Amino acid sequence: MIYVFQNVKDTLAHWWAEFNIQTRLMAVATLVVSLLMSALTFWAVNSIQQDARLQDTRFGQDLGLLLSANVAPLVAEHDYETLADFSRRFYRRTTSVRYMLYADEQGNIYYGIPFSESQVNNSLTLRRRIQLPDNYGPQSGAIMVRQHMTPDGEVADVFVPLMQGDRYLGMMAIGINPNATVVTSSHLTRDVTIAVFIAIWVMFILGAVFNALIITKPIKELVVGVKNIADGNFKQRVDLPFGGELGELIFSFNDMAERLERYEEQNIEELTAEKAKLETLVSTIADGALLLNPDLEIVLANPAARRLFGWESREILMESVLVNLPDPVRVELTRPLCQTATGECEGGEFRITLQDPNLRTLRILLTTVLDQYREKPKGVAVTVQDITREVELNEAKSQFISNVSHELRTPLFNIKSFIETLHEYGEELSETDRHEFLETANHETDRLTRLVNDVLDLSRLESGKQYRFEAIDLAQPIEQTLRTYQLNARDKGIEIEQSIEPDLPPILGNYDLLLQVFTNLVGNALKFTLSGGRVAIRAYQITHAITGEHLPQVRVEVSDTGIGIDRDDQAAIFDRFFRVENRVHTLEGTGLGLSIVRNIMEKHHAKVNLISEVGVGTTFWFDLEVYQDHLLSTEAHSEFLSANVKISPKL
């Protein structure tokens, strides 16, 4: 036995000695990588298991809260038969719950599934108590979750206090089965990792043996031959009796050596120039790319360049580029192309606007292609970029900055003027004038603050920030908005009405964003309504015009009897800084309120609409989706969306 072991050891040592340094490093690297990957995989499996336990804990807490809300009233009313029936139906419909136990205030278990299927009023009830940690107070209303192993596997115990108001009714215990999919996945990942680890080493050992016995010698001969070829010895040949792929490789090497031996210096120069052209083209392939020879004929044109210049269905290779370029591009680039091709300049950058078929802006880069010695020009590389979107964004940014600067300039100028007047002539002014100046400066400061806040709100909405949506009772933000404007409406002599349909279902939305919508719309309505007018806000569930059934949407309308909006202004009313009062220069405002409203409605997947008539009034309205739990059925919701029913607002 010792002799056999010594022979195996000597054989392995001999094989290892035949390996070069690169092969030995590869073996070490394979060992390190395989061990590292195995460690990472087992760590991932453990993380998956920990995450599964955490998910089971969260699931148990959520399930406990849900069940306690349903069974607490039954326990408080001592309706144990309904409690038992509800528990049995719930237990039979889910595979996640292993057991359910109910205990009284002293911890005595009076019903359990599957431990007891008898009626709760039967004398054969369980006589056991729920054992909880000494430091846990169930009367606090907190849920406790713990996990332990059983003969049937791991289980998560969830202890939920049953509370009716501040009254402690007892305890409900639920056993949650672990996520079977996660457990199976972690076991499979572990088994696959072990198999991959073994397979890597089997493949490496087989490859090392094959490398040592078959590949190493001819590869060394080929390396020597390649070095001789690199040194200029094109007479080098490799003569080894090998067949298969190695034989083809040796034959190809000898054939290459013979061809190189026959090549002249001129052929090598041309190959090098073509290589330089191809490298230049590859470096610019992401955008439109053209390669021109010294005569400005098109040698290569990628698909992007063909699309940008409209050459998809034309054969333009070896034709003059000046003949095929669009007129604006040809006029702009004729002279620079000629100078670049002759070497008078190294190239340049140009921005050209094309009018047809759509307005487009192109950035064109010219680069001289030189020979291998970088002395003589061999052609021109042209890179074409479509920067239309970039130009539009820059113009929009400039317009936005210009608008903000204009809006900021007026209140800042007014504040500075009144403060300077108070500073220089304060003693000469009367108390009334000083009070008026300070009131005006304070008023302009408020105006400046509103503008900055509106700009920040609009920027936040357009930044792609994610908002949390939940069930919202529309009566709350509507009543809060009306309370805010009640005094303002009373001072202006305007009547505010609200009409909220009884039993209105909650909608899916964000409370703060909806409050901002109501604030902007009601504030605008009060601003544009004269004394004696009326502002009304309504909310009602949409009904089908034919069947009269409720649809899963709630409509909100904000109406006023104000000055109205001219038809020419209605298309631009939601644009930034657009104000109806710009035409009369009498009313205040930043011109951002309705733009903010539109963006908030887009966050709610809704659209704000308006109906207005000059001298009569204006109505803004939008439809919000009913919260999912309150939909009549998924089929009814789908039918509503597919029917695309359009209903006019109530006027």
Image (cartoon, rainbow, N blue to C red):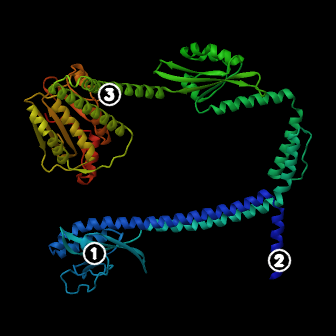
Secondary structure of residue under mark 2: helix
Q: Secondary structure at mark 1?
A: loop
Instruction: Point out the image quarter for the C terminus.
Output: top left
Between 574 and 138, the one lying in front of the other is: 138
Q: Amino acid at mark 3?
A: Leu
Give the mark, 2 or 3, whose residue is nearer the N terminus.
Answer: 2
Tag nearer the camera, 3 or 1: 3
Compute the Cα span from label 3 to label 1: 59 Å
The residue located at (33%, 47%) in the rendering is 467
Q: Is residue 368 left or right of residue 239?
A: left
- Viewer-nearest of labels 2 and 1? 1
Relative side of 643 to 376, left or right: left
Q: Is residue 125 above or below residue 197?
A: below
Question: Does any portion of residue 463 appear in the rendered image?
Answer: yes
Q: Can you identify the residue that label 3 sits on? A: 408
- Name the residue tied to disc 1: 137
Side of 249 where 172 appears, left or right: left
Q: Which residue is mark 2?
A: 6
Give the residue at x 57% y 14%: 332
Q: Residue at x 46, y 28 (%)?
A: 389
Q: Is residue 343 above or below residue 408?
A: above
Query: In the rendered view, does 358 fall on the left or right side of 195?
Result: left
Q: Which residue type does callout 1 highlight? A: Gly
How far apart marks 2 and 1 lie (CA) works out to 70 Å
